[in-house]
Image: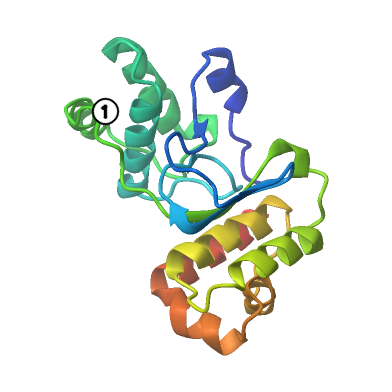
């Protein structure tokens, strides 16, 4: 069994790893969700799924997001958080990273400034009040909203994968198709090799 992430340490340090859009306004807002018809890149949500960080590139991206969301931290405080994140024993990564490589990565992140890190587009953002909803209920809501658009992009598929994984359900092509109210052929055509691998990783961590 894989080791659980030590999120309590981050919470005790008051580290921000989730933030809703700050200037993008939802096209529709209810007690359960915000819907962005054109999508938003401003929602940063780390550690949504059980899947861990498996590459240097992903680790650096997580650091960039943490730096962006916690720009009030001193460099030494941020460096401490990065070391904690990169320590395999804390349950966030699946690999060991050499100190020299980690220090170089942290230095590069600190030198980026306040530029927003590259992010995936989100269309439906569920609120805490929606936590009680079952996967089927969430799929029904998202399907009704996303179904208004005929285009199913990789970013949308990835977001659907995370939503399914959050409910501790195995990701299948049929579930993804139901999510968007489309055919499985549409999912196969748009998912891409990178998301196929991510799908396997998410399912493996269940």
**Residue 46 location (% of width, % of height):** 50, 39
Between 97 and 120, the residue placed more toward the observer is: 120
**Residue 1 location (% of width, % of height):** 67, 47
Q: Residue at x 46, y 56 (%)?
A: 39
Between 102 and 11, the residue placed more toward the observer is: 11
Q: How many marks?
A: 1
Q: How is the image coloured?
A: rainbow
Between 91 and 117, the residue placed more toward the observer is: 117
Q: Residue at x 33, y 20 (%)?
A: 71
Instruction: Establish if 181 lies above or below 2.
Output: below
List the residue tagged with mark 1.
Answer: 99
Q: Secondary structure at mark 1?
A: helix
Q: Residue at x 36, y 50 (%)?
A: 55
Relative horizontal placement of residue 75, taking residue 10 as reference (left or right): left
Instruction: Establish if 181 lies above or below 119.
Output: below
Disc 1 crowd rating (10 Å Cα; few below 14, some 14-19, many 20+) is few
Query: The C terminus appears in which quarter of the rendering?
Result: bottom right
């Amino acid at each position: 069994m894989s080791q659980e992430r030590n999120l309590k340490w981050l919470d005790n340090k008051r580290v921000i790893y989730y933030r809703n859009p700050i200037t993008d306004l939802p096209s529709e807002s209810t007690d359960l969700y915000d819907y962005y018809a054109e999508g938003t890149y401003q929602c940063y949500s780390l550690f949504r799924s059980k899947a861990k960080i498996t590459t240097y590139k992903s680790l650096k991206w997580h650091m960039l997001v943490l730096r962006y969301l916690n720009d009030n931290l001193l460099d030494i405080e941020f460096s401490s958080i990065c070391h904690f994140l990169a320590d395999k024993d804390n349950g966030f990564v699946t690999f060991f990273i050499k100190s020299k490589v980690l220090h170089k990565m942290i230095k590069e992140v600190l030198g980026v400034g306040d530029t927003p890190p590259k992010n995936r587009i989100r269309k439906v953002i569920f609120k805490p009040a929606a936590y009680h909803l079952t996967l089927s209920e969430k799929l029904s809501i998202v399907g009704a909203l996303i179904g208004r658009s005929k285009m199913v992009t990789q970013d949308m598929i990835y977001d659907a994968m995370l939503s399914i994984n959050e409910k501790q359900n195995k990701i299948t092509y049929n579930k993804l198709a139901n999510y968007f109210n489309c055919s499985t052929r549409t999912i196969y055509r748009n998912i891409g090799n990178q998301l196929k691998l991510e799908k396997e990783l998410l399912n493996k961590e269940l």
